[in-house]
Image (spheres, rainbow, N blue to C red):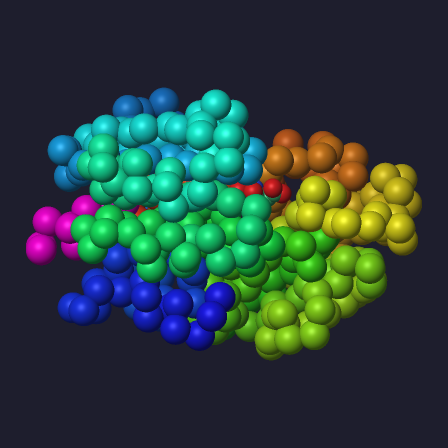
Amino acid sequence: MAQDDSTLQFDDKGNLRHLLSLQGLDASLLTELMDEAEGYLTAPGALPVRSQSLAGRTVGNLFFEPSTRTRASFDLAGRRLGADVLNLDVNTSSRKKGESILDTIYTLEAMQVDIMVVRDASDGVPAYIARHVAGHVSILNAGESDVSHPTQGLLDLLTIRQHNPDFKNLVVAIVGDIQHSRVARSASEALQTMGVGELRLISPPVLAPSEGRFPGARIIHTLAEGLKDADVVMALRIQRERIGNLDGVPGIDEYFANYGVSRESIKVAKPDAIVMHPGPMNRGIEIEGALADSPRSVITKQVRNGVAVRMAVLNRIGKMMSMR
Ligand code: NCD
């Protein structure tokens, strides 16, 4: 993200207007969003929280890359706050016929879509759109290439806080295809803003991040060293769709043997360490299925938190809009 994009996120009164990245969101704003998200959580089996705070507003979901969790949770979050939600079918949208992204955006703007949730495979698309939309429209980044995925970063932060709110004394280990992961980028930004004790990024050398991509993190290539005494272990998928040349990327068995997060490999972590995964999971490759289903796994909690965090973000944007 270019330097001034973090200021683009706020309006002239300092309110969050677009959510493009977690860079530029300070610890108090991250905390407020997490606190608000907590308020949207109800016990399993209970009815979800509903409000009419976005009644009259329209949220458009524009996902130009596949998505299950993020898209479904933005959809539910918008509906539970009383908004109309439009899910654009990208396979039949005119962008497939060569329409530029801005023409698609202006079309939705003309239909009075106020909040556009955008996922795209290219760098810079959310900020580019944010620079071109009308003054009353907000853009929420739902996954930008390998650059950022801010609501995922927020839900990961909340899930970690529920385990242990003492960020300064936590060791967080993220394992997998770090170089191509927007999830790792946003989680790292959020954790560092909260002053995380130690952030470790573990991957085979071929999937390690390029120089300067994760300032302040420890880059490690051996799983046992990376997981030692960790409080939080997050496994990530190999993002094959973002890797031009797969030469040198370990095969499935070799990968699982050396970097698979499993009941065996996690033995060196803290006895109460939690296991996270943003999904979609490849069982038996980056994570052992039995571990993903075990009590230490907080993977379904992450999904629950995802709806709550998106409600918190949407509600804040809605409040900003109604203050105009
Ligand atoms: C991730 C994504 O799309 O960046 N998934 C998600 O949003 N829950 C991770 C992935 O695709 O591996």
Residue in the picture at 69% in, 59% down? 179
Residue in the picture at 57% in, 46% down? 121
Question: From what the image shows, is residue 143 above or below residue 29?
Answer: above
Q: Position of residue 252 (x, y in %)?
A: 86, 39
Image quarter where ligand 1 lies = top right
Side of 140 relative to 125 (left or right): left
Residue in the picture at 76% in, 67% down? 220
Residue 40 or residue 248, whichever sits in front: 248
Residue 12 or residue 300, whichever sits in front: 12
Q: Is 193 colored magenta in this rendering?
A: no
Q: In which quarter of the image is residue 311?
A: top left
Q: Is residue 88 visible?
A: yes
Q: Position of residue 221 (x, y in %)?
A: 81, 64
Q: Is residue 67 visible?
A: no
Q: Give the range drawn in magenta.
A: 314-324
| Predominant SS of the magenta segment | helix
Q: From this viewpoint, which residue is outermost toward the front?
A: 98
Residue in the picture at 29% in, 36% down? 108
